[in-house]
């Protein structure tokens, strides 16, 4: 389990847990970033991170991206949804 | 006749406003950057003998209370209980959009879902079982394409049906561990006669929705311990905090639902948005492209509008002015009245009106940036720079809007989550050079910097940004200490703005500019004329305005234009609206002109024909200016004909003119902006803003003028 900032462009990752205050969590959750969601890293750190979730693109500041812990998601998981 | 209130709720950028426009035929503003709908917008209309009121709720992702938008939406839905909620969904992103739907369903208000962007969705190869979706959610679902006006009639029919039959949506079920608690809490709340939907209230209380808890405080007093026990039980069972558990459960339900109704295309095509982003958000190319776009925006604005500005100027002063004065004298009007109307009102308002083409082009580009989706990218690119002042990229959006007009910019700070970020951003907005300041630059650069007009104007805009960053840094170290709020933002897909969209947006803004010229500015011009002519017949420096301006002028000596009391006098009415500075300068410097008794050496129709011909030439020149490559166009200010301009030129040096432009750039924003700051943040922030916008311009102009003098300009 590594923070989102640790992944390179193009990696597919599964969100495991989100640390941090309620404000951050609630924002991310309402955008679909909940534990279990599979996202693709479009633009990695340094600087703000962009991830793609289904067909939406979400920008996370470095501070926020550090709080999202993920694991690598195998390609197959994608089609499960 | 009872009015049927329909609230439109949905995520940002799903085309809610476009849908309302399509239904009501009203001209509402539609946008494509996160949260353009910050004010409460309504439209009223009649259909089949019924009266409808459509309320455009702010774009929200959920009904939690973390942003002002979410609070506005929650408050409206709970307290005003609209008759029907139309949940607008961007069907190309259905999973995320349904999150809000599951929350809306708990409000127990009849609902209809508009599956918007339907044509885009189909063309991407998706297939959705609309029938099945309607059945599971127990909500009529209607495919729509708001921009093309498709599906509108059916949507309206379903809304009426939902209203008449009071069809309530199905509510999703949570895991039984949670359901137990919800049911128990519902019973407890029923006894207390809570005035909100029971299930909604139970969930919100369990979720610790601070905003809602505050609302129902007196209903749940004494129950707090029991509720806390329920929360703990759920958290222990799932091993996560309650809010995450509930969000996860909602997405679990949605994923199951979507699996039943949605067929994704087998082949995943590369999306155009991703390709464009590869270039526009590129680490190396991103910033240069951004600055190039902004530079081109000002360049085309200037080159395209210059010939039209000349034409309007000639039309008003040469044609309208001439025939009006002939007409007035012909009717035996006294000399002072002709002077008031021609020199006061017409020349001032005329000068301001002549900048309408400039506004038009500027607003055109601002709209394209907004509607295309590029604005959010600009915020992303600027994140690093904004961090210098303790803000993040999202604050940049209101600041860019400030280039168009500071008033909506102040309102647009509402997209920011934290109060601190909002206040700081609002204090920096007045340093963003709004459209109304452009006429001032146009006038002075036309007189002093003909060859480098676009560059000088660009440098002024740039300076505004730099000054705001420096001021921001100082404020952050002193008044606004502390962490800034999370930077989380959606990048909307790129969309080609339709002509209709752009026109609505440009016309809305240009119209208010023209209206201002006809009302506020005209009245100010009349008042100004009196101050400039009392006592009547005395030389300009002995008039009321002259005396005041001359008394304060020594203060401005270090800035280089202290000796021109007229320039200082023009700043005074300029606080009402910045464009008045130009009109006032026109009046003040035009004073010494002898009042010509115009003679009709040509006939009215001859003149009119000539004007039409001139317009045609101006339009051709404008097109040439826009597409004519990089050569900077020149304002053809005809000095020999316009002696006021010649006199302005003689009283300034290029350096003092530049200093004056910088001063106007940073000086107190117009009354409307100050009003917006006051209504959003209160008197304290207003005072701080006034303090900043008086001391900062003074210091900056003084530094520039004296440095420039040392350097030999």
Image (tube, coloured by chain):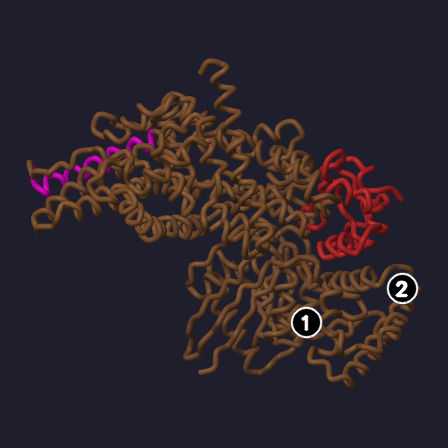
Chain colours: A red, B brown
**Span shown in magenta:** B602-624
Residue receiving disc 1: B105
Q: Compare marks 2 and 1 and give the one earlier in the sequence.
A: 1
Numbered circles on residues, count: 2
Q: Judge by depth and name the residue closer to the eye, B461 or B124.
A: B461
- Name the chain letter of the residue that bears numbered label 2: B
| Callout 2 secondary element | helix
Residue receiving disc 2: B235
- Name the chain letter of the residue that bears numbered label 1: B
Q: Is residue B702 magenta?
A: no
Q: Report the quarter where the N terminus of chain A lies.
A: top right
Q: Judge by depth and name the residue closer to the eye, B199 or A79.
A: B199
Which dot marks residue B271? none
Q: Is residue B611 magenta?
A: yes
Q: Give how far apart the Cα atoms at labels 2 and 1 are.
A: 24 Å
Name the residue: 48% across, 61% down. Answer: B150
Q: Main secondary structure of the magenta part?
A: helix
Name the residue: 56% across, 42% down. Answer: B691
Identify the image quadrant of residue B80.
bottom right
Name the residue: 27% across, 26% down. Answer: B646
């Amino acid at each position: 389990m590594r923070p989102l900032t640790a992944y390179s462009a193009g990696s597919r990752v599964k969100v495991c847990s989100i640390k941090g205050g309620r404000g951050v969590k609630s924002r991310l959750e309402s955008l679909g970033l909940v534990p279990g969601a599979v996202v693709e890293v479009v633009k990695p750190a340094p600087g703000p991170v962009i991830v793609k979730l289904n067909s939406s693109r979400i920008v996370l500041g470095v501070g926020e991206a550090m709080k999202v812990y993920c694991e690598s998601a195998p390609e197959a998981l994608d089609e499960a949804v | 006749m009872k009015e049927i209130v329909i609230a439109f709720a949905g995520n940002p950028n799903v085309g809610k406003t476009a849908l309302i426009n399509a239904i009501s035929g009203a001209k509402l503003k539609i946008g494509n950057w996160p949260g353009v709908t910050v004010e409460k917008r309504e439209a009223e209309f009649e259909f089949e003998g019924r009266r409808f009121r459509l309320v455009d709720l702010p774009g929200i992702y959920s009904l939690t209370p973390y942003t002002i938008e979410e609070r506005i939406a929650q408050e409206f839905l709970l307290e005003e209980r609209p008759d029907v909620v139309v949940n607008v969904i961007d069907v190309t992103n259905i999973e995320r959009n349904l999150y809000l739907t599951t929350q809306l369903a708990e409000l127990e208000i009849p609902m209809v879902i508009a599956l918007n962007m339907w044509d885009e969705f189909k063309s991407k190869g998706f297939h959705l079982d609309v029938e099945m979706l309607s059945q599971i959610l127990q909500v009529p679902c209607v495919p729509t394409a708001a921009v093309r006006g498709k599906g509108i009639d059916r949507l309206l029919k379903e809304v009426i049906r939902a209203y008449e039959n009071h069809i309530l949506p199905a509510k999703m079920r949570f895991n039984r561990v949670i359901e137990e608690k919800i049911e128990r809490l519902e019973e407890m709340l029923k006894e207390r006669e809570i005035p909100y939907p029971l299930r909604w209230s139970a969930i919100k209380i369990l979720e610790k929705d601070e905003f809602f808890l505050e609302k129902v405080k007196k209903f749940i007093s004494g129950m707090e311990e029991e509720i806390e026990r329920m929360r703990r039980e759920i958290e222990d069972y799932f091993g996560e905090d309650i809010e995450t558990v509930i969000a996860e459960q909602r997405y679990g339900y949605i994923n199951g639902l979507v699996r039943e109704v949605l067929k994704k295309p087998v082949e995943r095509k590369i999306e155009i948005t991703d390709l464009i982003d590869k270039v526009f958000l590129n680490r190396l190319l991103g910033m240069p492209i951004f600055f190039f776009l902004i530079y081109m925006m000002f360049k085309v604005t200037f080159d395209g509008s210059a010939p039209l500005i000349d034409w309007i100027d000639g039309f008003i002063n040469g044609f309208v002015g001439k025939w009006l004065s002939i007409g007035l004298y012909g009717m035996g009007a006294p000399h002072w009245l002709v002077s008031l109307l021609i020199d006061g009102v017409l020349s001032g308002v005329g000068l301001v009106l002549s900048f309408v083409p400039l506004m038009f082009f500027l607003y055109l580009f601002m709209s394209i940036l907004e509607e295309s989706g590029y604005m959010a990218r600009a915020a992303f690119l600027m994140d690093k720079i904004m961090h210098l002042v303790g803000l993040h990229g999202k604050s940049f959006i209101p600041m860019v809007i400030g280039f168009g007009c500071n008033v909506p910019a102040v309102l647009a700070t509402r997209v920011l989550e934290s109060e601190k970020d909002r206040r700081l951003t609002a204090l920096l907005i007045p340093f963003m050079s709004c459209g109304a300041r452009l006429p001032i630059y146009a006038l002075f650069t036309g007189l002093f910097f003909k060859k480098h007009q676009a560059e000088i104007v660009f440098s002024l805009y740039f300076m505004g940004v730099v000054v705001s960053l420096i001021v921001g840094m100082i404020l952050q170290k002193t008044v606004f200490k502390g962490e800034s709020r999370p930077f989380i933002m959606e990048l909307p897909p790129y969309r080609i703005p339709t002509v209709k969209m752009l026109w609505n947006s440009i016309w809305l803004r240009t119209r208010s500019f023209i209206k201002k010229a006809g009302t506020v500015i005209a009245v100010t011009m009349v008042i100004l004329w009196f101050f400039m002519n009392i006592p009547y017949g005395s030389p300009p420096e002995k008039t009321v305005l002259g005396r005041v301006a001359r008394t304060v002028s020594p203060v401005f000596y270090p800035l280089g234009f202290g000796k021109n009391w007229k320039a200082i006098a023009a700043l005074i009415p300029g606080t009402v609206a910045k464009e008045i500075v130009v009109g006032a300068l026109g009046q003040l410097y035009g004073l010494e002109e002898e009042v010509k008794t115009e003679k009709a050496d040509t006939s009215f129709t001859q003149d009119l024909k000539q004007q039409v011909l001139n317009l045609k030439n101006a339009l051709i020149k404008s097109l040439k200016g826009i597409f004519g490559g990089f050569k900077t166009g020149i304002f053809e200010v005809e000095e020999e004909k316009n002696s006021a301009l010649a006199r302005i030129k003689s009283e300034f040096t290029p350096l003092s003119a530049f200093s004056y432009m910088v001063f106007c750039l940073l000086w107190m924003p117009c009354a409307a902006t100050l009003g917006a700051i006051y209504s959003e943040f209160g008197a304290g922030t207003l005072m701080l803003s006034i303090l900043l916008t008086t001391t900062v311009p003074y210091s900056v102009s003084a530094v520039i003028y004296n440095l420039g003098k040392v350097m030999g300009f």
